[in-house]
Amino acid sequence: PWVFAAAGSWAILPNDACTGLGAFFDPVSVSCGNCSEVARDAVPTADRRGCECPPGLLLCSAARPCYPTPGEPAYVVPQGFECVACPEIGGEPTVPTQDGSRCIACATPNVDDRYLQDPATGRVTDCKCPEYHRLVERTLNGTVLPGKTCAACHDSEAGLNRNFPGPAVVDQLVRGVYECATCPDPLRQYYEAESQTAEPECVCEATQYEEAGAGCVDRTAYERINDLDPVTEAIKFYY
């Protein structure tokens, strides 16, 4: 259980006490509170020790102004925080940046399918890129772009998918992919597109390398050693 001290007394709260819809543990009152009473549309954090805004909404607080409408002054919250929806501009939705501080457009190439939506609320939560691409919302110096774009996660010159979008997780249904994961040995391994699964698999580049154990070795060297001492099944001895 969780044990907390309050006003000179002790209170014991089981781990599963604050599990109702919108419930979180309030350390001030040493009891369960509800995020709906903290801010409209707020939801509990993963550990239920506070509240946050769900995907698709800005978190605007007294300490951190936000910019819901591009090009307009900051929206300042006098106290606490608010969950603020991004507006439509020209009939198209805008979405929050990763830090939840401002709204920008989706400038991704897949025009007919460029938005992620929360299946529970139907709210647009982020932009969507084609397979094997990642979202980009800032320049190299950190400046926010006018709209989120997509960058390829593969080595187009070599014709191999040496990288791939970050591991598939439940949150990916409502949060875009911003990183390309790399194979453990990017010089000898690549990600085979047709083998894409929830647990991405990297394979050895077959024309030059041979899979050996958990890595790849030069095929020529492998064949030389194999000629001298061929690979065989392990032999079991019983005593």
Image: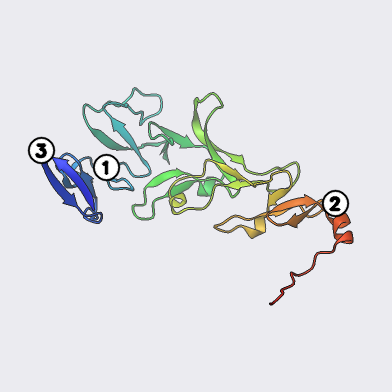
State the residue position of label 1.
50
Q: Nearer the viewer, mark 3 or mark 1?
A: 3
Q: Quick check: 26 left or right of 95? A: left
Q: Nearer the viewer, mark 2 or mark 1?
A: 2
Number of residues whose C-alpha sits closer than 10 Å to that of mark 2, classed few (under 14), some (14–19) or many (20 or more): few
State the residue position of label 3.
7
Number of residues whose C-alpha sits closer than 10 Å to that of mark 1, classed few (under 14), some (14–19) or many (20 or more): some
Element carrying mark 2 = helix
Quadrant where the C terminus sits is bottom right
Element carrying mark 1 = loop
Q: Position of residue 174 (x, y in %)?
A: 43, 49
Q: Is residue 40 above or below residue 13?
A: above
State the residue position of label 2.
221
Q: Earlier in the sequence, mark 3 or mark 2?
A: 3
**How much space separates mark 2 and mark 1, taking CA atoms?**
58 Å
Amino acid type shown at disc 3: Ala
Q: Is residue 143 above or below residue 155?
A: above
The reply to whether residue 109 is in sight is: no
Amino acid type shown at disc 1: Gly
Q: Position of residue 184 (x, y in %)?
A: 65, 46
Q: Residue at x 43, y 50 (%)?
A: 171
Query: Which residue sits furthest front?
Result: 239
Q: Position of residue 221 (x, y in %)?
A: 85, 51
Q: Earlier in the sequence, mark 3 or mark 1?
A: 3
